[in-house]
Image (cartoon, grey):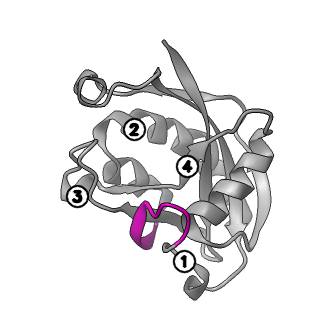
Amino acid sequence: MKYRKNVGIILINHKGLVFMAKRKVNAKFDIENNKCWQMPQGGIDENETPKDAVYREMMEEIGTNNVKLICESNHWYNYDFPKEVLEKNPLPFIGQTQKWFLFQFMGQDSDFNFEVHNPEFCDFKWVEIDEIASLVIDFKAPTYEKLIDEFKPIIKNLFD
């Protein structure tokens, strides 16, 4: 079994707050109500670059790409799906390997549209980067902690 290639989107607003989207109810992951938030992410199609994938996923998941690219992660981050998830939903991979991109959002909150390609989200909020790991489903939290370590200094630098 292998990892599915994936891109992740860290979107910050003009105050340096991070965009978190609320997942629709999803029996696949038995999401607790308080752990239903995440940053947008999605698979990389065959023959697609991570950069092409991140802009496509942004449109598919949040309905806007009114953004400015700041940087991308120094490496790929991996996480494994819990055994119980794989037992309920057999998948051809054991988890995901992700390239993350940091963007500055250039639009208005009204630009977000979740009624797009296979809607996954129903709401959003802006939070301090230190909060993101506490809002996600447990098996993604270690990855989010690593993202905080890598991207918090960059975000802080932009707004100091």
Give the distance between the C-alpha atoms of the residues marked 4 and 3, in whole angstroms. 19 Å
Q: What amino acid is labelled 2 in the image?
A: Lys
Q: Which residue is mark 4?
A: 41
4 or 3: mark nearer the eye? 4
16 above or below 8? below
Residue on which disc 3 sits: 34
Q: Amino acid at mark 1?
A: Asn
Name the disc covering residue 113, or none: 1
Evaluate if marks 1 and 4 touch, with contact meaning CB atoms under 8 Å apart. no
Q: Say which of 105 and 26 sits in front.
A: 26
Q: Residue at x 75, y 40 (%)?
A: 50
Q: Quadrant of the C terminus?
A: bottom right
Disc number for residue 51: none
Residue at mark 2: 140
Q: How many marks?
A: 4
Q: CA distance from mark 1 to mark 4?
A: 15 Å
Q: Are marks 4 and 2 in contact (CB under 8 Å)?
A: no
Is the residue marked by circle 4 packed among few (<14), some (14-19), or many (20+) residues within 10 Å?
many
Where does residue 132 sit, x and y in percent of width and height? Answer: 42, 53
Q: Position of residue 120 (x, y in %)?
A: 43, 60
The numbered mark, 2 or 1, whose residue comes first in the sequence reads 1
Nearer the observer, 85 or 159: 85
Label 4 sits on a secondary structure element that is strand
